[in-house]
């Protein structure tokens, strides 16, 4: 994805800010695109402005105010960060307050039941060829199984290259991960067999391709495609009509993987002290706090799990003495 071409009088600052973010280790791709939209608004409505003013920031917030709260936050955050950056360099800049916009809408993770998983995967196995997307009937059954069996983020799966997957050993190199931290995972024997059979079919159509899961042009699918596919097959299922709470999403396959894995270890009476860090590493969490979220979702075995995790918490969390 190419960087935007900035046109406003803030363009030099915008370019320097993005360079600084990437030097710190952030990919800053989506946020750079947001700043491109922001720059366009400045160039069109504030062509003579050479500083990030309160009027400009408020105009941006108003322009995005009709968006979903979570989307609005993603549009405002890069501009707030830009303000902090400019102020840090000694330039006059308005910094959008932390309470703007209001708190994100919270989504409770949906943990798919075994019946729901069986119904969904049976549904996608019936996917037919499309003249507009000739490879989707092969991609869909495989990519969703990869998401669930490995707990991948959707971007990690759709951006896999052929060279990232070792079809001899089952080793997968996850390059483009959250926070830009790469990692290596291994798939199960059954998943590896499925990947091999899938690759054999796709290679006949697109020999020498780069994308492991190619679209009709042989390129990578867009970020919205997997969401569209999921709802195409999920929404028509009887199970979907009786689901309570938030509508399930593609990301819930990742949540479900983590919870199923934790529950399995509890049932097997496995050494949680030894295995817990591996789950964090496998799913690409930068710290245990992110993985801890799934402990609250492991409801069927939570009492036993909590008891068994007490030794882990005692080992890694120092006791804080009370002040007299």
Image (tube, rainbow, N blue to C red):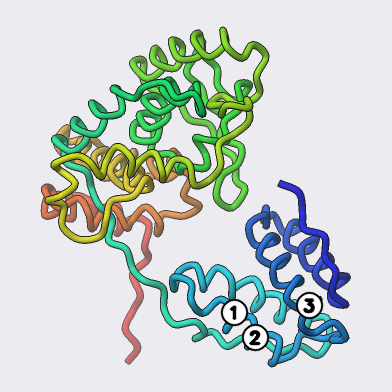
Q: Residues within 10 Å of mark 2 (few under 14, many from 20)?
A: some
- Assign the C terminus to one quadrant of the image: bottom left
Q: Residues within 10 Å of mark 3 (few under 14, many from 20)?
A: few
Residue 149: x and y, percent? 34, 31
- Circles 1 and 2: CB atoms closer than 8 Å: yes
The residue where tag 1 is placed is 63
Which label's residue is closer to the chain start, 3 or 2?
Answer: 3
Residue under the point 49% across and 35% down: 157
The residue where tag 3 is placed is 44
The residue where tag 2 is placed is 59
Question: What is the C-alpha distance between the residues marked 1 and 2?
Answer: 6 Å
Left/right of residue 221 with respect to residue 20 in the rendered view: left
Residue 86: x and y, percent? 78, 80
Residue 88: x and y, percent? 77, 82
Foreground: disc 3 or disc 2: 3
Secondary structure under badge 2? helix
Residue under the point 80% across and 70% down: 14
Relative vertical location of residue 241 with respect to residue 100 in this rendering, above or below:
above
Q: Which mark identifies residue 42?
A: none
Secondary structure under badge 3? helix
Q: Residues within 10 Å of mark 1 (few under 14, many from 20)?
A: few
Secondary structure under badge 1? helix
Residue under the point 16% across and 35% down: 114
Quadrant of residue 140 in the image? top left
Which label's residue is closer to the chain start, 3 or 1?
Answer: 3
Question: What is the C-alpha distance between the residues marked 3 and 1?
Answer: 13 Å
């Amino acid at each position: 994805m190419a960087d935007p071409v900035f046109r406003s009088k803030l363009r030099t600052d915008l370019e320097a800010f993005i360079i600084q973010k990437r030097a710190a280790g952030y990919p800053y791709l989506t946020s750079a695109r947001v700043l491109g939209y922001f720059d366009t608004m400045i160039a069109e409505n504030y062509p003579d402005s050479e500083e990030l003013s309160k009027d400009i920031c408020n105009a941006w917030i108003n322009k995005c105010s009709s968006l979903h709260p979570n989307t609005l936050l993603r549009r405002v955050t890069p501009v707030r960060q830009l303000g902090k950056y400019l102020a840090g360099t000694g330039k006059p800049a308005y910094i959008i307050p932390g309470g703007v916009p209001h708190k994100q809408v919270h989504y409770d993770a949906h943990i798919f039941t075994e019946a729901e998983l069986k119904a969904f995967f049976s549904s996608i196995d019936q996917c037919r060829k499309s003249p507009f997307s000739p490879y989707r009937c092969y991609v869909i059954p495989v990519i969703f199984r990869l998401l669930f069996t490995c707990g991948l983020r959707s971007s990690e799966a759709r951006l896999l290259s052929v060279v990232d997957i070792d079809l001899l050993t089952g080793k997968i190199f996850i390059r483009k991960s959250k926070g830009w931290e790469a990692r290596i995972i291994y798939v199960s024997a059954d998943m590896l067999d499925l990947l091999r059979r899938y690759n054999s079919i796709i290679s006949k159509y697109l020999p020498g391709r780069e994308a492991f899961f190619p679209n009709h042009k042989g390129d990578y699918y867009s970020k919205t495609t997997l969401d569209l596919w999921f709802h195409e097959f999920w929404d028509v299922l009887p199970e979907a009509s009786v689901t309570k709470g938030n509508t399930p999403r593609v990301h819930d396959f990742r949540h479900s993987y983590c919870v199923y894995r934790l529950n399995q270890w509890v049932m097997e009476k496995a050494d949680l002290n030894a295995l817990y860090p591996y789950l964090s590493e496998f799913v690409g969490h930068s710290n245990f706090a992110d993985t801890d979220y799934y402990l609250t979702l492991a409801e069927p075995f939570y009492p036993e799990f909590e008891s068994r995790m007490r030794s882990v918490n005692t080992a890694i969390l120092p006791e804080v003495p009370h002040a007299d």
